[in-house]
């Protein structure tokens, strides 16, 4: 059976993760679903985040023949993943939050930036402390960054980044988790304000290797995956910035389709 790897995000943030995964494993076929109509998820209730995420995961499994789905949205990973995994005991659904927490747990003083939903869920501190009991985790929400990325207003992000980072940097952190898949798109902006001795933990650098290792351990999944090197991009609303980034990162061969979930 010919099946694909599905990647889901609330908007365009997960495109960077998809690009990095595809670079690490170019042989497979991918389908990316961005819920651009309902982004951002960060200020939504837990129940709504679960509902939206389940609709997207259902679509990827049932309409797109995915053998595995990666939830590339930290808010959804924090607030819906466990429940989704229980609802699909026979399907593979993975999130991006745990790989970042595993990397962060190598440090002792850790700062986390995320959406209001991710920060309020307290998932990063919980997962980091499971792996490193001595870790001290400081968190700060960064609500304006997702809308700026979605609207292509990256040049305006600097002042917000500085504002959101200030309370974390005052705690003498050793590592900073970019706890939202939209934030790596602003990585160069972050580097202007984060001291060089602070490690920036960015999911586009971590998730591909973790997924590659996971698939190597699960041949029952890899056997089902088709290998035509294709990528299909699905969106719930065609936004200009999404089209620009899709062409830039995946070339004109990447077809973007509008869907309803």
Image (cartoon, helix red, strand yellow):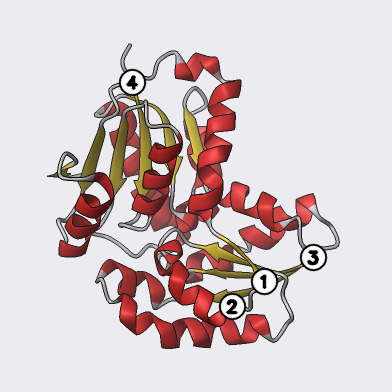
For disc 1, the marked residue is: 198
Residue pictured at 20% horizontal, 45% vertical: 251
Residue at mark 2: 194
Whether residue 142 is visible to the viewer of this picture, yes or no, is no
The earlier-in-sequence mark between 4 and 1 is 1
Residue marked by disc 4:
227
Mark 2 Cα shell of 10 Å, populated few (<14), some (14-19), many (≥20): some
* Inter-mark Cα distance, 4 to 3: 41 Å
Residue pictured at 43% horizontal, 55% vertical: 47
Q: Are marks 2 and 1 in contact (CB under 8 Å)?
A: yes
Relative side of 214 to 3, left or right: right
Query: Are discs 4 and 1 less than 8 Å apart at CB?
Result: no
Closest to the observer, 66 or 26 = 26
Circle 2/circle 4 CB separation < 8 Å = no
| Image quadrant where one finds the C terminus | top left
Q: CA distance from mark 4 to mark 1?
A: 39 Å
Other residues around mark 4 within 10 Å, as few (<14) / some (14–19) / many (≥20): some
Label ID, residue 108: 3
Q: Nearer the viewer, residue 16 or 118?
A: 16
**Mark 3 or mark 1: whose residue is earlier in sequence:** 3
In this rendered view, identify the residue nearer to me: 135 or 243: 243
At 48% from the left and 81% from the top, the residue drawn is 161
């Amino acid at each position: 059976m010919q099946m694909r790897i599905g990647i889901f995000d609330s908007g365009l943030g997960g495109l960077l993760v998809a690009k990095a995964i595809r670079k690490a494993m170019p042989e497979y076929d991918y389908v990316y679903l961005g819920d651009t109509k309902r982004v951002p998820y960060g200020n939504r209730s837990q129940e709504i985040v679960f509902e939206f995420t389940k609709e997207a995961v259902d679509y990827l499994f049932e309409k797109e023949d995915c053998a595995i789905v990666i939830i590339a949205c930290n808010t959804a990973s924090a607030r819906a993943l466990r429940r989704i995994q229980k609802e699909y005991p026979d399907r593979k659904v993975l999130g991006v939050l745990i790989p970042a927490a595993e990397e962060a747990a190598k440090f002792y003083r850790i700062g986390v930036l995320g959406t209001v939903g991710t920060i309020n869920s307290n998932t990063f501190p919980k997962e980091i402390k499971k792996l490193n009991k001595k870790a001290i985790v400081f968190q700060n929400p960064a609500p304006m960054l997702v809308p700026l990325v979605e609207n292509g207003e990256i040049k305006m992000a600097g002042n917000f980044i500085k504002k959101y980072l200030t309370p974390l940097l005052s705690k003498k952190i050793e590592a900073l988790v970019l706890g939202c898949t939209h934030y790596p798109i602003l990585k160069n902006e972050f580097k202007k304000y984060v001291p060089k001795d602070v490690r920036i933990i960015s999911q586009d650098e971590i998730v591909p290797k973790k997924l590659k290792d996971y698939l190597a351990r699960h041949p029952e999944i890899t056997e089902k995956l088709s290998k035509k090197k294709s990528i299909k991009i699905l969106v719930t609303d065609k936004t200009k910035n999404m089209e620009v980034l899709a062409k830039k990162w995946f070339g004109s061969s990447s077809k973007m389709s509008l869907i309803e979930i």
